[in-house]
Amino acid sequence: MNMKSKIVAIPTQVKMERRYDIDALRVLATLLLIIFHTGMVFNPVDRWHIQNLTLSPFVGILLGFINQWHMPLFFLLAGASTFLALEARSSGQYIGERVKRLFFPLLIGVLVVIPPQLYIERIATWVPTRLSPINFSGSFWEFYPQAFKCCYSEGNLSYHHLWFVAYLFVYSLILLPLLQVLRRPSGRAFMQRLADFLTRGVNIFWPAALIAWVEVSMRWRFPYWQDLIHDWANNVHYPLVFVLGFILMSDGRFKQAAFRNRHLGLIVGLLASVARIYIPGGTSGYVMDMTLRGVAEWSLLIALLGYATLYLNRRSKLLRHTSEIAYPFYIWHQTVIVIIAFFIVRQPAGIGIKFLAISFASLLVTWLLCEAIKLTNITRVMFGLKARKPKSASQPIAKSGQQPQTSTLTKAGAHQQ
């Protein structure tokens, strides 16, 4: 009888445990998008939809560092939260939720959110570094029917920064059979044996070898371009990180291992990132660069998980509020940045002043949009939030220990970025 109680208690404990550090990391990663995509306006390494005439090498280095681990962090958190989601849902329920909270907002995004970005790029004829320098003269409403002419960058139809939502939706469906196998007794036994090995000493860093192998073997053939069907380096890389996130959530010892190795992860990640700057060209240089990329990425992810366990694993009203609006914030932020940057980059000011103006204005406007989206059930559903029940049918006010709602970016989870 006691043994039976223990067996039942294990999945119950997993379902009820709240990882506030996971929620907080997702919120911070979403806010970092403001800095990243504002930086793209001044990045000399990559062309973008709208750019300043004067670019900054320092910004290029900073974005290169962030790009190593930023989107992998989103996929890692997505996999971790998917473990918890599947503990409380059947496969059919999970698929239905993914359609409702990923595919439908993606469709709305392509119809509503992306066209203004396309329009700004088309009328910014004075920007020589536009990613797709096709000119247009006329109003937005005159342009709108052309926004669905396939396909960007030769045409217009695109999901732009919403590639993450599209990828996450596809990965969630394709990986579901594997994840359900891992949830079976044999799969849980496998993950436990994996935890036995990876949580000893510094073994938690071994997955870096898998990531490095993917980068070395595939990145030369499939450089960054998020069109999904030709993006095979990312189509192996990101699902790998997603599954690793799922596995990390399966055993509490992974959390402890990340905490113990947080300092080492930070040091190794920073050293590998700096070393990449000085890698020479050629085949040997490419192999070394991609290897260091894998090491830097995974080491920094472990560091982030470890420090989040120490500093961010606590509930708060601010976390509850920001966690709810993180998904619509992700959906809208880049469109807001592109529109605001269109006006600011033409002003007679230095890069620093323009960067601050674009980032702060974009943060404020995007936040106000998210607050407006929360007001009606129609807009909530359009942008991936749960509809609010009428007050008469609502649940009692949550007690102090009750967990907040998990946002879409964490649950199933949000270019180059």
Image (spheres, helix red, strand yellow):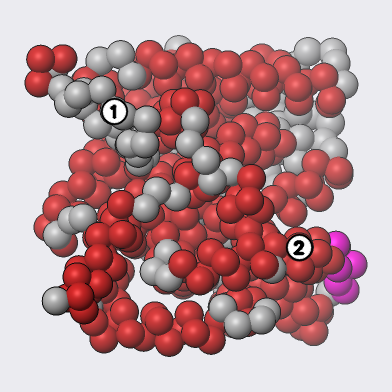
Residue displayed at 54% across by 46% down? 313
Q: Which residue is mark 1?
A: 398
34 or 196, which lies in front? 196
Q: Which amino acid lies under the numbered mark 1 shown in the image of this protein?
A: Ala
Count of picture labels: 2
Could you say where residue 318 lies in the image, as x and y percent from the top left? 51, 26
Look at the numbered disc 2 and give the secondary structure of its residue.
helix
From what the image shows, is residue 163 above or below residue 295?
A: above
Can residue 151 be seen?
no
Alpha carbon distance from label 1 to label 2: 37 Å
410 relative position to 278: left or right: left
Could you say where residue 94 lies in the image, as x and y percent from the top left? 20, 54
Can residue 116 be seen?
yes
Q: Which amino acid lies under the numbered mark 2 shown in the image of this protein?
A: His
Could you say where residue 31 lies in the image, as x and y percent from the top left? 58, 34
The N terminus, quarter of image: bottom left
Residue interval drawn in magenta: 274-280
Q: Does the segment drawn in magenta span residue 174?
A: no
236 or 143, which lies in front? 236
Look at the numbered disc 1 and give the secondary structure of its residue.
loop
Would you identify the image quadrant in which residue 79 lies?
A: bottom left
Residue displayed at 54% across by 15% down? 365
Residue displayed at 20% across by 75% down? 2
